[in-house]
Image: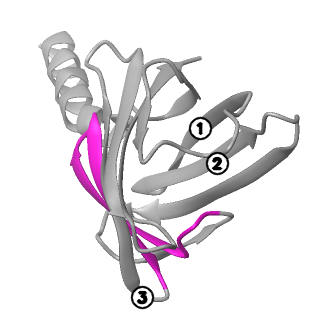
Amino acid sequence: MSRWLFFAVVVLAVCIASPVFAQDAHVGTWKQNFDKSKTVPPSTNPRPQSVTRTYEMFGDGLKATFVTVTADGKSTTSGFSAHFDGKDYPATGTNFDTIALKKIDNYSFENVNKRGGKVVSTGTNVVSKDGKTMTFTSKGVNASGQSTSAVLVFEKQ
């Protein structure tokens, strides 16, 4: 009888704990595949050597670090730490100063980026079910007031 009770308690504990420990599929390091990515209007800057995004858990949200190595080899870092509660959180080194995240599921989330309290872009970040590809789709307005859109494809490292 005690074995069955022990087994039942273990099964119940695993079932209860599994959703708590479910990790967001974005967690890890991702490198941009420029051949599969597209921006409108196309960038007038030379293509970077690399763009790497690293996501870590941040409580019930994500900490993101973006490292870009420019065509001439200079490295810049930007990022944010935000919860999935739809509230604005500071972003650094970007063309926006706050970001708000809303989780869709463990494979996708939406973001709203603002500069000076005004929305400059919105996007959706989706990881493929096999966990190998991440696609970021966005629409916005650049500093000149021109409409922009992007589909950026990243591969898990």
Q: Position of residue 29 (x, y in %)?
A: 59, 28
Residue pointed to by mark 3: 117
Residue pointed to by mark 1: 53
**Residue for point 69% across, 29% down:** 50
Q: Amino acid at mark 3?
A: Gly
Disc 2 vs disc 1: Cβ atoms closer than 8 Å?
yes
- State which region is magenta: 94-115
Secondary structure, mark 1, is: strand
Residue pointed to by mark 2: 65
In the figure, 39 relative to 128: above or below? below
109 and 24: which one is in front?
109
Q: Position of residue 69 (x, y in %)?
A: 78, 37
Q: Main secondary structure of the magenta part?
A: strand
Q: Position of residue 94 (x, y in %)?
A: 61, 63
Name the quadrant of the C terminus: top right
Question: Real-space Cα distance between discs 2 and 3?
Answer: 22 Å
The quadrant where residue 110 appears: bottom left
Mark 2 Cα-neighbour bin, 10 Å: few <14, some 14–19, many ≥20: some
Q: Amino acid at mark 2?
A: Thr
Question: Taking 43 as reference, is 134 left or right?
Answer: left
**Residue for point 74% across, 51% down:** 77
Secondary structure, mark 2, is: strand
User: N-terminal of the two: label 2 or label 1?
Assistant: 1
User: N-terminal of the two: label 2 or label 3?
Assistant: 2
